[in-house]
Amino acid sequence: MNDNKRRAIVWSAIERIAFQPKSTSDCLNWLSVYAKTLHSLWGLDPLWGRFGLNDEFVVPFLNLRCRHVIESESKYSVSLVQDSSTNRCYWQIHIDPEYLSKGSLYSASGRYPHQQRAQLQRDIESVLDGMIFHPRCHTHLEDLGVLQVQLDQSKGGLSSHEVRIGGGIENPYVFLFHLRCQFCLVSNHVRQTERQRLIDLFKRSIRDNQNVSAKDLFNFLR
Amino acid sequence: MKRREYGINLDDGVALETDEEFRLLYVPCNPDETACIQGWFADDTLESLLLGGQIGSGKTTLLKEVFRSFIDAQIITVCFDTDPIEPLEGGYCMILFGRILQASLRAGVEIDGCGIALSDFPSIDADSWHAFADKTTTWPSNLQEAERLRDACAVMSENAGLVRKACGELLDRLRNIMSRKPTIIAEGIDKFNPGTPEYFSLKDTLTFLAKRKTLFEVNAVHLFQERDFRPGIRKLFIGGISNDMLAHMLKKRLGSYAPIYQDAFSLLAEYSGGNARQALRLLNAYYFRRTQRQNDHTSAIALACHQVGKDLLNVPYGRFPTDIFAVVKRDGYMEGALFIDRENAPGANDAVYHNWLFVQGEPDPATPTKWPAILNPLIDKAIEWEVDAPRTPEEQAVRKWARDHGISPIGLNLPVDDNGKPAWNKFWEEIESSSEEETLNILGVLEEIGAGLFGVERQDRIIITYQDRKNLEAVRDFLVGEANTYSHFPCEEITLEGGEEREPVIELLMRLSDKDPNRIYSVELTGKWTNAQLRDLEHRRDILDNLQMLWWIQQDELKRYLRFWPQLRQFFRIYKLEDELWRGITMEEIQVDIDFIKDMSDESDPEGVRRLSAVLTYLKEVGGKS
C-alpha cells in the first residue's frame, strides 16, 4: 500500500479513536479534561474547570478569547475574539455538514497493512503534523490582526507566529485539540515533547486497536 | 515543591529550598553578604554572627543557598521557632541539647559524663543516647508522648544552666574530635518579637550560643539588641533589594511568559520597597488579576497593592508609631538610638518588625547611627504627602483608578485632623472598612484560591473567615471535592481548640508530624485562644511552609489574632465568605462533577465523590437551587 493510502487510514483511525466521543456525557467529559489540562501544557497555574458544548476560554498571554459552539461531531463554530472591552472578532469558522467538502467525499477503507507496520510511526508523525501541529491550510495570528507576541527566547519561548490556525478541520474536537497545541508557546521543547507523547500514544493504540480515553489523550494524571 | 521548568512559578514568597528551585528561581541579590557568610563558614577563627533582616527580606533563602555548598560540613542547625516542644526555657534547652547530642553521636563523641545522665529524665524513657536524641528532636505523635516531653522540659527549665553546661561540654568534645570549632546555626530567632515572654525565655540560651561559633538568624530589630547576645557581636544586615534585582526575580517567576508582563515589573518593584516577599506577593496578585479577572494593567496594579497591603499590613490600630513615620519620611533614615531609647523603642521595634518601615541598608561610616529607611510604599503611596516628588503618569493613573473605585491603600488619601495633621486612626479605619465589603461567595473563593488548590506546582495557605459559622463542613467539602476533579487530593481535617487547659499547638504538631505536600489540610480554629497560644503558633510559622492549607476562622476572632501574627500572616492570603454562600452553585453541576470523578478515578470510593455527595445532600436538605 502506498504512503497516502496508509496515512488516510491512520488519519481516520486517529479521529475515530480519540476525537469522536459518543454520548453527551462523553463529550462533556472530554471537554472537562481538556479544560483541566490546558494550563498544564501551557505552563500556567490552573485557570479552567470545565467547558460545555457552548463555551469560551481566555488565552491570557495572547489577549484572546476563544468561543466554541459544538452541535455535533461534524457541526460547530469557533470564534477568536480580542479579550478586551472592544470584543473585536478576529476570525470565525462555521462547519456546516449540509454542504460538501473534498474531505467529506472520501472515507478511508481497509485496515492498516500489517506487513508495513514498520512504517506506522512515520505515518502517525505525518498525520499528526497535518492534523494538529502544522495543518496544510492555515492562517497565522498576525494575519488576523492579533498583536504579535514573543515569549522569552532564552527559555525556549516561541513567537505567536508559530500559531497556525488550521482551516477545513471538520471535527470540533480535533479543532479544539489543535488549538491546544498551537497555543502552546511556552517552549519549543514542550511542544516537541507533547508531539512525541502523542505519536507514542497513537502508535500503541492503533497497534492494539484500542480507543484513546480523554484521560490518556490529555495526559490527565490523577 | 515541584516547579515548572519553562512556565509560571508563583507563590506567596516562601523560601527556596530544592536544587530545582535554586536553579530556576534564585537571584543572587546579596553577593557581598553571601560571600561574607561563606567566608564565615570556612574560617574557624571567626566568632558568632548575627544575620539580620526584616520579614521577607530573603534571609532564609540566602542561608539555604550558602548551606548548599557546605552540605558535608558538620553543622548543627537548631530551629528555635519550629522545633521546641514548648516555648519555654526548658523547651529551648531541650532542642539545643538534642541537636548537639545528635551531632556528637554522629561524630562518635563519648556522651556519658557530659553533665547530664539519661536517668535525669525518666519521663523521656530512653534506653540509649540515640533514643534520647530522637525523642527530644522529633514532634510527639500523641498527647501522652507530648506530656512526657513536657515533664522533661520542666526538669530542664529548673536546671537550664546545667543543661547548657552539658551542651558546652559536648561541643568541646566535638571540637576535639573534629579538630575544628563546631558551627551552629540558630534558625528562627527572627520570629521572636523582642519584648515577648518567649523571647525573654530564650535570652540565656542566646547568650550561651553567642560564646560559640554560632550564626543567628534574626530580624533587623535584634541587631539593636546585642546585649542579648554578646557585646560587640559581629552583625550582617540584609537590606533592601534593588529594583533591578527585584525585577529580575519577577522575570524568573514568570518563566517564558515574562515578556508579556514586563511592563509591570518596574512599578511592582517600586511598590515592594526592596522586600522580596512583598514583591512576589504583589506579582502573584497582579498576575491573578490580569489572567483570571482580565483586569487591565492599571487596575491590576491597584488591586494587587490593595490585596497585599490588606493581607500583610492591616492590623487593628493600636500603637502606630506616627512620630517615627513622619521623621523617616522627612529624613530618609532612622536613628539607631530609637531602638534602645525606652520611650521610643516599642514603636521603632513595631514599625520595623511589622514591615511598616523598611530599613534599606547599614549606616554610612560617616553617620554610623543613621540607618537609611523608607516607609513601606504600600502605606507611603496611600498618603498625599505635600513634599512628594511629582508622580509618573503611570502612578497617577493607578491612583486615579483606585480613587475612582474606592479602594485602598493606593489612592486613598490620608485623613487630616482639625490641626491639619495626619489622622492615622482614621487611615486604618478606612482600610478596614473598605475591606469589610469584600466578601466572596464560594465560587468566588474557589476562583481566588484555585491556583494552589488544583495543582501540585504550588501549595498556598488560605484563611477563610466568616461571620456566622453555619455549615462550614459543606463549604470545605465543596472546595476539597472540586480540587479532586483535578487530581487526587486527600484532605485532612484538623480542629484546633484554643483556650486555657487546651493544647492546640501540640495538636497541630502531632497532626503534621507526617507532613504530606499532596494533602489538603483543613484547619478550623475554635475556642478562645490565649495570647500565649497565638504567639506560639506565630513562632512556628515555618512548619506550614509548602503545605496546602485552608484555615477557617471567625471574622472577629481573626481581627484579634492578626495582631499576634506579623510572621504567620506572611504565609497566608485572607478571604471573607459572604452570607449568600451558595449563590451560583447548582445541584446539577455538582452531580456532573461527581460523575466526572467517578469516570476518571481508579479508586472504588474516591474522596472527591464522597465530599461532593455530602454537599449535594446538604443542598437538598436546605432546599438549594436546582
Image: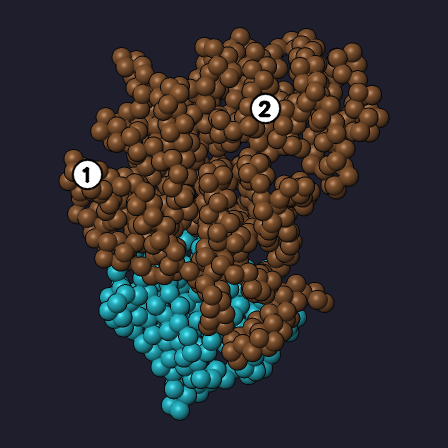
In the figure, the shade used to draw chain B is brown
The secondary structure type at the circle numbered 1 is loop
Q: Amino acid at mark 2?
A: Ser
Question: What chain does badge 1 belong to?
Answer: B
In the figure, the shade used to draw chain A is cyan
Q: Which residue corresponds to the image point at 42% horizontal and 60% vertical from the top-left?
A: B439
Residue B148: percent from the left, percent from the top? 77, 33
Q: Which residue is mark 1?
A: B419
Question: Can you tell which mark lies on residue B201?
Answer: 2
- Look at the image and tell me whether residue A47 can be seen: no
Q: Which residue corresponds to the image point at 66% horizontal and 22% vertical from the top-left?
A: B93
Q: Amino acid at mark 1?
A: Asn
Residue farthest to the front, as pictured: B418
Relative to B89, is B244 on the left or the right?
Answer: left
Residue B39: percent from the left, percent from the top? 48, 16
Q: Is residue B11 above or below residue B337?
A: below
Whichever of callouts 1 and 2 sits on the residue coming sooner in the sequence is: 2
